[in-house]
Image: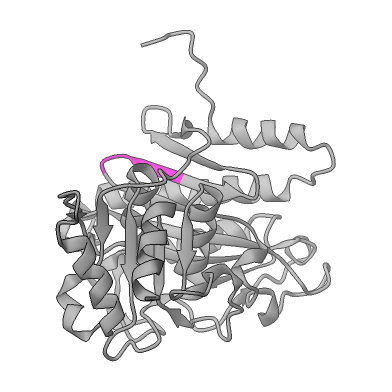
Amino acid sequence: MNLKQKVMTLDEFTIQELRNYPGATGQLSGLLRDIGLAAKRVNVEVNKAGIADILGEAGKTNVQGESVKKLDEFANEQFINSLETSISCCGVASEENENFIPFHDEHSKKSKYVVLMDPLDGSSNIDVNVSIGTIFSVYRRLSPEGTECELEDFLQPGTRQIAAGYIIYGSSTMMVYATRRSVQGFTLDPSIGEFCLSHPNLKCPVDSDIFSVNVGYYHLYEEKIRKSIDHFMARNENDRIYRHRFVGCMVAEIHRTLIQGGIFMYPAFGKYSSGRLRLCYECNPMSFIMEKAGGVSMANGKQRLLELKPAQLHQRMPIFIGSKNMMDTWQHIINE
């Protein structure tokens, strides 16, 4: 270990970034630190969930009609409360709430940004101790500063994101966020309770041998999607074998893809004829991160996902995302 190596915390990094841009107001830096604080609170409960009676069902469903876990509720409250007490956010839209939540105090109404989030992605993994995560994205409001935020502030195409990120609660807890300049990864050091810069300037490998899709629904996917899956499951002319992975948590899938490369596919199928993952809370932020890291994200074989304008807060969307070369291969197959 190099004892002279400088370990930079999330707070130190955001302050340094602020110094590099003298005209910046600091609201985005403050907002990212507020999200990091809420993530640390959630991480504590995740780590002691088995002994704190916080695992299991909450006894109700969310706006999506899905069973709400106790930890879902806790995470949602922590992120909303942290952002509401901040002076850097004028409102929040959460996957767990039917409508967006405007903040009413005068400081919040003067803020420039709104936040959209999935407070706890991969809820089905909670009770079996598999990776779960948080996803967020930040937009500059369209409504006038000094007033309460409006629905249109949240229904912007992904290309207009100012920042996006995720927190993964796994063997270690990491916060990865992207701005328009770069993608940075921070690992939580439990000994000091701080996120420390561990993965600077993340780039997604341009190629890989990993593909991720829920093959349990294979027979429900349309023919061209099945054809692309067949390609990755078969040996090719160079006797190349692709490895299949599927976790059931988008944060875990994208984190692996960002670090190791690959392609993650979540097509439309069956009753989810418009897709299953949420455009605003999951697809847009992950697509922004992946593109800033050099990857590609598509809604179908021809449409860049980030260019789509959401029609409603809880709109669902198919997504195909990953390393540039693997995405090029996938597009070629389904467009033949």
Q: Is residue 67 visible?
A: no
Look at the image and give the residue range highlighted in magenta. 171-175
Left or right for 157, reference 249 = right
Dividing the image into 4 quarters, which one contains the C terminus?
bottom left
Q: In the depicted view, which residue is nearer to us: 90 or 308?
A: 308
Dividing the image into 4 quarters, which one contains the N terminus?
top left
Q: In the depicted view, which residue is nearer to us: 178 or 245?
A: 245
Residue 135's quadrant in the figure? bottom left
Is 67 magenta? The answer is no
Left or right for 59, reference 12 = left
319 vs 79: above or below: below
Q: Magenta stretch: dominant SS?
A: strand
Residue 93's quadrant in the figure? bottom right
Q: Residue at x 23, y 69 (%)?
A: 229
Residue 215 pos. (x, y %): 18, 71
Q: Residue at x 36, y 56 (%)?
A: 326
Pick out the residue farthest to the front: 237
Residue 270 pos. (x, y %): 26, 89
Q: Residue at x 69, y 66 (%)?
A: 90
Residue 162 pos. (x, y %): 66, 57
Residue 23 pos. (x, y %): 84, 42
335 vs 11: above or below: below
Q: How is the structure coloured here?
A: one colour
313 vs 188: above or below: below
